[in-house]
Image: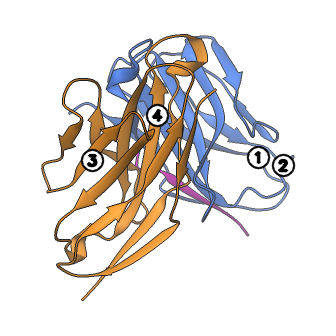
């Protein structure tokens, strides 16, 4: 079985401030890790993912996440946020092999609110 | 462009009525999923299907039913047995046995009981 814990349900920040959204996971198998973003009344969109190789992955809009195997974490960071980054962010994990492990397991989400 | 289409975007249901939410994909994905989203509770899996004419219950299947007669379509029926159906419903799809691709999501249907 696998699980995802997003440590903060809400994160308020001011525009141009840095932000970190925390994600920890547990799994008995090797994993793939994902961050999704959801804007109000929309579906989820893939923001970035870690598959293998370099532990630091980046998105096209300035977010990055670092896979830390020893701490079983995949925290999402952005050095300077914009108002338009206001959204809910979901961390997700899937196993690299085996039956039900293929399904994505989602965290409960972190609502990022960027204030002017 | 390939993607997932959910319809309608907003749906109102009277108590005691069944209602069906549509989900259609043209991505040629084998697997499809239905999630329910409530504030502060994240995504909860209702049903999923890995192949045509087969589907499995998720974590909160009671009061819901699905069918998978075509690869492209995975409609969800919210029955009168679902006591608290007001929620945001999301449909997703994925490539079977390729977890590295993740899921593609539709834009959701907001169901309100009136």
Label 4 to label 3, Cα distance in Å? 14 Å
Q: Which is more foreground, mark 2 or mark 4? A: 4
The chain drawn in blue is: B
Q: Mark 1 and 2 residues: CB-CB less than 8 Å, in contact?
A: yes
Do marks 4 and 1 both belong to one polypeptide chain?
Answer: no
Q: Which of the 4 quarters of the picture holds residue B49?
A: top right
Quadrant showing the N terminus of chain B: top left
Do marks 3 and 2 both belong to one polypeptide chain?
Answer: no
Compared to residue B27, the image places residue B38 above or below, namely below
Residue B45 lies, in percent from the top left, at 63, 38
Q: Secondary structure at mark 4?
A: strand
Residue corresponding to mark 2 = B80
The chain drawn in orange is: A
Q: Earlier in the sequence, mark 4 or mark 3?
A: 3
Image side of residue A35 versus residue A6, left or right: left
Residue A111 lies, in percent from the top left, at 44, 67
Q: Is residue B79 magenta?
A: no
Range of residues picked out in magenta? B106-114
Label 2 to label 4, Cα distance in Å? 34 Å
Q: Secondary structure at mark 3?
A: strand
């Amino acid at each position: 079985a696998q699980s995802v814990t997003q440590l903060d349900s809400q994160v308020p920040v001011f525009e141009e401030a840095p932000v970190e959204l925390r994600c920890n996971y547990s799994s008995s198998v090797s994993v793939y890790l994902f961050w999704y973003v959801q804007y109000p009344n929309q579906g989820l969109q893939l923001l970035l993912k870690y598959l293998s190789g370099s532990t630091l992955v980046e998105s096209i809009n300035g977010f990055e996440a670092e896979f830390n195997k020893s701490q079983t974490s995949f925290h999402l960071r952005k050095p300077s946020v914009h108002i338009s980054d206001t959204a809910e962010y979901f961390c997700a994990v899937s196993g690299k092999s085996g039956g039900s492990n293929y399904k994505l397991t989602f965290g409960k989400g972190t609502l990022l609110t960027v204030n002017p | 462009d390939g993607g997932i289409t959910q319809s309608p975007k907003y749906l109102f249901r009277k108590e005691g009525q069944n209602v069906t939410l549509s989900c259609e994909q043209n991505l040629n994905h084998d697997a499809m999923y239905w999630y329910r989203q409530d504030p502060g509770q994240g995504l909860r899996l209702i049903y999923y299907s890995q192949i045509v004419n087969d589907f499995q219950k998720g974590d909160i299947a009671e009061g819901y039913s699905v069918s998978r007669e075509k690869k492209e379509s995975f409609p969800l029926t919210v029955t009168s047995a679902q006591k608290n159906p007001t929620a945001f419903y999301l449909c997703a799809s994925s490539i079977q046995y390729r977890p590295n691709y993740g899921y593609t999501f539709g834009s959701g249907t907001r169901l309100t009981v009136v």
